[in-house]
Image: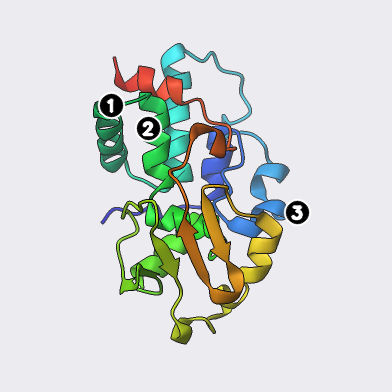
Amino acid sequence: MAKYTEAKCRMCRREGTKLFLKGDRCFTDKCAYDRRPYAPGQHGRARKKVSEYAVQLREKQKVRRVYGILERQFRGYFVKADMAKGVTGANLLSYLERRLDNVVYRLGFANSRNQARQLVRHGIFTLNGRKVTIPSLQVRVGDTVEIPEKSRKIPVLAEAQEVIARRGCPTWLEVDGAAFKGTVKALPQREDIQFPINEHMIVELYSK
């Protein structure tokens, strides 16, 4: 499987905004974007004329990098969103939010989506009582994500309650930190996604 192996902070600098790819580190003085808020490379500080296509492309790349998805899979989500009923952009974001690795991150069981993806692949979590190892699995209303008793002493997961208290939980999810369990109460709506995303530009890009 393809994997991005370069410095993750370069992606934040390239997109011109914090993508929170390193979890809590992004809130400290060590954040590379805070220290160098310009694009990487020797021409990073140069002023450039930006075309409409470039703006749309950067928006798509930003969302793709936030959720840690490669181009082929991201386009697949767009095709499904376009075929589904409702607004294509909102459907796309809903599919991305309902990924199991994103749900684990949103529940506070991981400091970043990348860490959540790794934990899911290692079989740390159960979905409705069954062990799962597929980060892209789509959750449904009523699904329960839980950490088994034997895995709760892992240092990263032992800090889950502190992360939950600090970060909070979206309204479409319900988390019980003491029981290391989270439940999907409803499907995510557009207003539940606070990260600045202009999904209309992504729709326009793929519709050309």
Q: Work out whether residue 34 or residue 206 is closer to the camera in this orientation and state it.
A: 206
Looking at marks 2 and 3 on the same chain, the residue that comes earlier in the sequence is marked by 3
Q: Nearer the viewer, residue 113 or 194?
A: 194
Q: Are marks 2 and 3 in contact (CB under 8 Å)?
A: no
Q: In the rendered view, tell whether residue 23 sits above or below residue 150.
A: above
Left or right side of 72 for 106: right
Q: Position of residue 33 (x, y in %)?
A: 65, 43
Between the residue at mark 1 and the residue at mark 3, the CA separation in whole angstroms equals 41 Å
| Res 18 seen here | yes
User: Circle 1 is placed at which residue position?
Assistant: 82
Ranked by sequence position, the earlier of labels 2 and 1 is 1
Is residue 193 in sight in this rendering?
no
Q: Earlier in the sequence, mark 1 or mark 3?
A: 3
Calculate the distance from the C-alpha at mark 2 to the C-alpha at mark 1: 8 Å
> Helix, strand or loop at disc 2?
helix
Q: Can you identify the residue that label 2 sits on?
A: 91
Q: Is residue 138 left or right of residue 110?
A: left
Residue on which the image places disc 3: 29
Quarter of the image with the C terminus in it: top left
Looking at the image, which residue is at 30% across and 27% down?
85
